[in-house]
Image (tube, grey):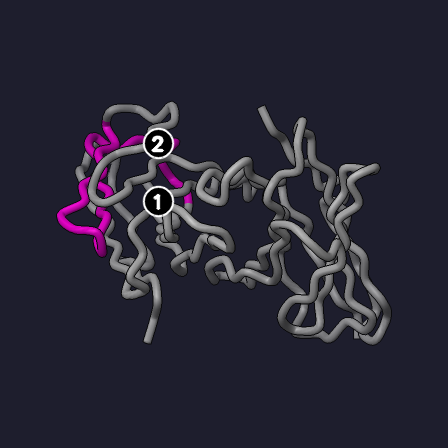
């Protein structure tokens, strides 16, 4: 069973469209994340949710809106897509507290804006 | 703020040769340290991690890494590289496990 699964894996869309990427984890974690990997492979955190509450919100345009309906899901909605939004978006999860925490990543969603 | 540097953007080694990928971090205290691998078109897989204790940590797929406080380094090693090890390797550091900063990655190519 996939621990952190995200859909779709590939998405090609036109500028100005609105799209969503869904993420689900079955690890029983209470913290979920969205990371963005740009064309130069640079990975940067976008958001982090703990028990459905936003705890990290890096400098991200407000066109990006995460939504966490429950602890196991963290979806990413993007409005008015721009060319620069083309990237790989990784969902991840972990336990919030305790030692030995590890962040587990999904397989990524390749977004191409044309 | 913490930062992490992977000085080598690309490394090519022959199959069966040993490997060392470098990672240097900048932070006032000992951070949490991780190595992840990303195969082409795939997500990130954790190879190993260091939180405390023994400075030489063993990971999956025959990888190990050594934390050297004096050098602010956490280099990844493998004694004998296999063709399937060709991938992108990312070092990550964090002041907590939940807030990671990634290095720019090192692309490993393996010659037959």
Please give the count of numbered marks on the rendered protein.
2
Q: What stretch of residues is rendered in magenta?
A: A63-87
Residue A110 versus residue A113: which sits nearer the camera?
A110
What residue sits right under mark 1 in the picture?
Answer: A33
Q: Residue A78 lies in magenta, yes or no?
A: yes
Up-down relation of residue A63 to residue A28 (above or below): above
What residue sits right under mark 2 in the picture?
Answer: A56
Q: Secondary structure at mark 2?
A: strand
The quarter in which the N terminus of chain A is drawn is bottom left
Tell me what residue is drawn at x 22 percent, y 37 percent. A53
Tell me what residue is drawn at x 31 percent, y 33 percent. A55
Q: Position of residue B55 (x, y in %)?
A: 75, 54
Q: Position of residue B12 (x, y in %)?
A: 79, 59
Residue A2 in which image quadrant: bottom left
Q: Pointers 2 and 1 in contact (CB under 8 A)? A: yes
Q: Secondary structure at mark 1?
A: strand
Q: Position of residue B44 (x, y in %)?
A: 50, 57
Residue B75 versus residue A7: which sits nearer the camera?
B75
Is residue B104 visible in the rendered structure shown here? yes
Tell me what residue is drawn at x 54 percent, y 62 percent. B40
């Amino acid at each position: 069973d996939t621990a952190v699964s995200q859909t779709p894996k590939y998405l090609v869309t036109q500028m100005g469209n609105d799209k969503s990427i869904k993420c689900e984890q079955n690890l029983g974690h209470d913290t979920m994340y969205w990371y963005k990997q740009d064309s130069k492979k640079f990975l940067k955190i976008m958001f982090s949710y703990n028990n459905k509450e936003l705890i990290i919100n890096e400098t991200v345009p407000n066109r990006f809106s995460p939504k966490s309906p429950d602890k196991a899901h963290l979806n990413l909605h993007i409005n008015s897509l721009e060319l620069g939004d083309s990237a790989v978006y990784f969902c991840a999860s972990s336990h919030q507290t305790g030692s030995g925490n590890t962040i587990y990543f999904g397989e990524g969603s390749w977004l191409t804006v044309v | 703020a913490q930062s992490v540097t992977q000085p080598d953007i690309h490394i090519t080694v022959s199959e069966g040769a040993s490997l060392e990928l470098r990672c240097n971090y900048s932070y006032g205290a000992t951070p949490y340290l991780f190595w992840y691998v990303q195969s082409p078109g795939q997500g990130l897989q954790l190879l190993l991690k260091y939180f405390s204790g023994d400075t030489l940590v063993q990971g999956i797929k025959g990888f190990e890494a050594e934390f050297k406080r004096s050098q602010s380094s956490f280099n990844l090693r493998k004694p004998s590289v296999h063709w399937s090890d060709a991938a992108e390797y990312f070092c990550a550091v964090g002041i907590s496990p939940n807030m990671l900063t990634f290095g720019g990655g090192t692309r490993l190519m393996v010659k037959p």
